[in-house]
Each structure stands twice: as structure tokens, then as C-alpha cells.
Image (cartoon, helix red, strand yellow):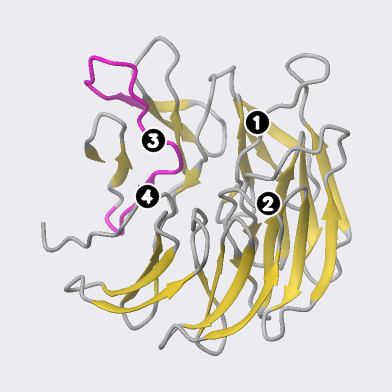
Amino acid sequence: MKWSFLTGGPIISSPAIGADGTLYVGSDDYNLYALDSLTGTKKWSFAAGSFVHSSPALGLNHTLYVSTSQNLYALDARTGAQKWSVPIGSSGPSSIAVGQTGLVYYAGGTKFYALDGATGHTLWSLASPETLHAPIYASPALAADGTVYIALDDYLYALDGISGATKWAYNFPKPSPNTMEDVGSAAIGADGTVFVASRHLYAFSGQTGALIWKTADLGSCGDPVVSQNGTVYIPILPTSQNGVLYAFDAGTGTVKWQFRNNSTDESSLAFGSAAIGIDGTVYCGSLDATLYAIR
């Protein structure tokens, strides 16, 4: 261990790292912290006034965006000074995404929003289409062409990032009437293929929304990540077995390998996504209190 930093509460969000090496992470102690990633020394902290469960995102002009269960904040990444804030109502762990033009995309309650990153002014929004109106837990994914992919209720939307116009939408089958399928955050491959999990792992054409392949029922899934060599990694949460990390061929959906942890209890390999190192090593945290590095 090189260093550790103790906050006043659990850390649910994932950190963001700036170009200068500053690490930004939120805590349940109502604070967002900026740390030196080499030493763990605190540079500054921001009192957010509520839980910080979502992951912060860096934008243009040294701006850092972070949402809480009540507000979305724009901060000066260098000092932690607040630039602006907007109320967003009830918000889950859905994280913010920032487009190349500086637009900020986030979920608040049952709506998905795009706003001007410089002013906080809302440009467009998309409401949950279902009558159940469940909170949005998935985070947006941005393609190189500016398309925004976001899951709302039982739908995956491909939206024009500038206008908010729907390019295509896919309605996932319901497991039973008056229920919703749990659709996670999407991952985008180098060729534009979009991967998303909803008990099955699905692969869609990013341009047309056509279904390319889907796996068999995997059970409760985490969010997929895709590597440059065309492998999709996804953690499967446990039912009566230990957690499993699957590696699928991105082109065909066939299983390349699976890794099972050695816990004796019903531990999940991860709640969220795995991370892929520059050398291809896959890192995944587990509820058995272990960090795994898999090659």
C-alpha cells in the first residue's frame, strides 16, 4: 500500500483523476475530496450537503461536476470553489458524463437532462416512458460521434447529444407484468457496438440499434466494460453461488473464460464494473474483501 485516506463515511462512488494527477472522490460524510494521487494528501474538500454516491466528472475550463442526492454542483477543480449549482431532486448513484462540447448529461429522479456546462442552464430532458417511473440508476455513455446512450426503465435510448432527439430505442422484455427489468449502464466498443446488461448481456449496433447478439440469462449483472482487443468483461452477482467475472467475445458473444472467487459465502465479485489496466490486466473488487487482478 502506498497510502490511504480516511473519510468520515463509506465511499460509494468511483474516483476521477485529473490530468495533473489530482484524484477526486465523494463520501457519505457529505464531502467531496481532492487528493494528491501520489501521496494521498488532501488538497481541498467541498461540503456538498448530502451523500455523494455518484462519481465526479471533469469538464472544460478546469470545471469539476458532481451530483448528490439533492443538487448538481460545478466546482473549480483547482480550488474547490463553487461555480454554480442546480437542484435535481432525488438522485441515485447515476454518474455525470461530459461531452466534448462541454455539455453535461445527468439523471435526476425519473428524468435525464442535458445542460450547459458553463452556466447550468437545462438544454433538454427526457422523461421516463413507463408508468412505474423508477429512479434512473444507470449512467450515460458517450460515443465519439456525440451520441448519448442511457437506460430509462425498460428502455435503452440512443440520443443526439446536442438536440436530445431519439435516434433509436430498444424495449427490453419484462420478466413479468407490472415489473421492470434492471438495465445497467452501457459500454461502447471501438467499432461503435453498444453493450448493456439486463439479465442477458446484449450487443447492439450503435448506428441502428439492431440487436447483434445476446447471451443466455446470466442472472443479476453488473455493468460491462469492453477492452481494445474486443473482450467484454461483466461481473455476475450471486444467488446461491459465489460471484463470477465473465469474459465474452465482443463480436460473437461467446464465453472466452470465467473467473470465480474463492469465498465461502455468497459474495459478489463486484457491484459495478471491472477496470482494465494498460497491460490488459482486469481488476475487480469483491464483497469477500479482496481486490483481484486477473490476466
Q: Residues within 10 Å of mark 2 (few under 14, many from 20)?
A: some
Whole-number angstrom distance, CA of label 1 to CA of label 2 = 19 Å
The one of 210 and 224 positioned closer to us in this rendering? 224
Q: Which mark is residue 182?
A: 1
Q: Secondary structure at mark 3?
A: loop
Could you tell me which residue is drawn at 76 percent across and 37 percent down?
153
Badge 1 amino acid: Asp
Q: Residues within 10 Å of mark 3 (few under 14, many from 20)?
A: many
The one of 283 and 88 positioned closer to us in this rendering? 88
Precedes in sequence: disc 1 or disc 2: 2
Residue identified by numbered label 4? 275
**x and y, in percent, of residue 248 in the image:** 47, 32
Q: Secondary structure at mark 2?
A: loop
Chain part drawn in magenta = 258-279
Residue identified by numbered label 2? 90
Q: Nearer the viewer, mark 1 or mark 2?
A: 2
Whole-number angstrom distance, CA of label 3 to CA of label 2 = 25 Å
Q: Is residue 44 left or right of residue 80?
A: left
Could you tell me which residue is drawn at 18 percent across and 60 percent down?
4
Q: Furthest-front residue in view?
A: 49
Verify whether residue 83 appears in magenta: no
Precedes in sequence: disc 3 or disc 1: 1
Q: Is residue 119 left or right of residue 279?
A: right
